[in-house]
Structure formats: C-alpha cells, structure tokens
Amino acid sequence: MRKLLAILGMVTCMVGLSACGQEEAAIGPISTEYAVEYGVNTVLQMDMIVSQNAVDQYLGRDVVYAGLENWKDALAEIGTFEGTDGAEVKFDDDEIIINVNILGSDHDATVEIISEYDKATTSLEYLSISTNIAYSFGELMKMAALNTLIGMGTVFIVLILISLIISCFNIIPKIQEKQKKKAEAKAASEAGAAVQADPVVAQIAAKEELADDTELVAVIAAAIAAYEGAGSTDGFVVRSIRKSNKSKWQNA
C-alpha cells in the first residue's frame, strides 16, 4: 500500500512539473517558434536590402534604418553571410528579445532584435536592431592591448608636450632680455648718430665732457701755457680733449 502511494505521489509530481514547463513555455505574447522565425526573417530581409543598396528607402524608419546601417558595417567583419544557426528568445512583459546566431566566412555574429507586442493590433514593432561580432579570445586580447597602447601613448605624448611648454618658460625671458639689449643698443647708436649729425649738439656734448673734467682741463691748459712761455692761460681755450691713437714713436 505504501509503495502504491509513493508511486502515485511521483506521478503527481511529474504531471505538476510538466504542467509548470508548459506554463513557462506559454509565457509571452507570441510563441517561441514564431519569435525565432520572426527574427530569422528579419535578418534575411536586412541582408537582401543591403545587398540591393536599398537602405536609403528606410530613412523614415529610424530603428530599421539604424539596424540596416549596423548590419552593413558589420558585414566588413562577417565576410560572406552564410546563413543563420538558430536563435534565443526572451520575453519581458510585452517586449520580445531575439538573438539570432549569424554564420560568416570571417566571423560569426549575433543580431539582437528587440520588439514590442501591440495587443490592440496583435503586431510587433521594432524597438532596436543591432549586430554584434563574435571575436575570438586572441582577437579580444589584441584589441585590448592596442587600446591600452593607444591610451598610454596619448598620455605620454601629452606629458611630453607639457614638459616642453614648461621648459619654454625659462627660454622666453632670455629671448626677451636679448631683444631688450638689442633695442637699447640700437637706440644708443641712433642717439650717437644724431649727435654727430648736429654740430651744435656736438659742441654741447663737448662742453659737457669738459665740464666733467675741469681739473684735467686746467692741468693741460697750464702745461700749454708753460710750453708757450705765456704767463697765463687767457690766450687760448681748451674746447675738447681727445685720446691720440698714435704710438710714442709716431709722436716723436
């Protein structure tokens, strides 16, 4: 009797589990088979539209146009489209997420189609369509290394540029100082030329020089007076004093 009750209990549990599985399979606005067929047909239609260069006809439908452009760009990585290999379906309230497996000559891919079920019209409306390339582990590592290299290279280049800019802060004052000296020398030469060109200014400058060397003028005047045998220096005036470039032998 106990064995019979145990068998009946097991049968009841199995029936309950099968019923639960049927309920889970029935969850969603459409069946899984229809969702898979819908996703596969969407991929086939996109490939046909792209192959016929008719993408611009869907400019008014933003989601479809974006999905077609994404599929068109992905074909460069996929290579030759060789068909589909099943799909996975997920239901989220009225949203249906379909991942269609794509077979390609170069890379496989997955097309993710998210649609919304309209209960009033019992139709599906696209929410998004995107194509994701399935890269190998080696390709992912290569892309990661390349991204890291580019990022680090950019950082080092920026640091080098910053160091060069900082080093220029020490060079700029020196350049400014040289330019200032050149400007002062030029101004001094122009002033000297102006003095030589104007005899009145030259006489004034000579008098100023003599005024600064009064003692020297007095000594020279006394020496000249003694040489001439004059009793005083009233007979001549020392107007300027210039250094002789001749040697002693030439003076002799």
Image (tube, rainbow, N blue to C red):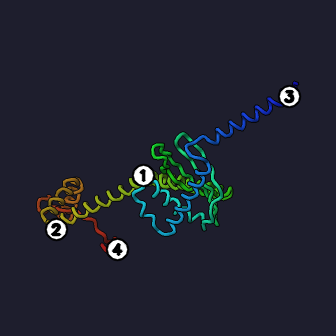
Residue 197 is labelled as: 2
Quadrant of residue 225 in the image? Answer: bottom left
Give the residue drawn at x 63%, y 56%. Answer: 101
Helix, strand or loop for disc 2? helix
Q: Which residue is mark 1?
A: 169
Q: Between disc 1 and disc 3, whose residue precedes?
A: 3
> Disc 3 marks which amino acid?
Leu
Helix, strand or loop for disc 4? helix
> Disc 1 marks which amino acid?
Phe
Q: Which residue is mark 4?
A: 249
Q: Between disc 2 and disc 3, whose residue precedes?
A: 3
Q: Which residue is mark 3?
A: 4
Give the residue drawn at x 64%, y 42%. Answer: 25
**Rendering coords of residue 57 (x, y %):** 42, 63
| Tag in front: 3 or 4 | 3
Q: Are marks 1 and 3 in contact (CB under 8 Å)?
A: no
Helix, strand or loop for disc 3? helix
The alpha-carbon separation of the residues under discs 2 and 3 comes to 139 Å
Quadrant of residue 42 in the image? Answer: bottom right
Q: Are marks 1 and 2 in contact (CB under 8 Å)?
A: no
Front position in the image: 181 or 195? 181
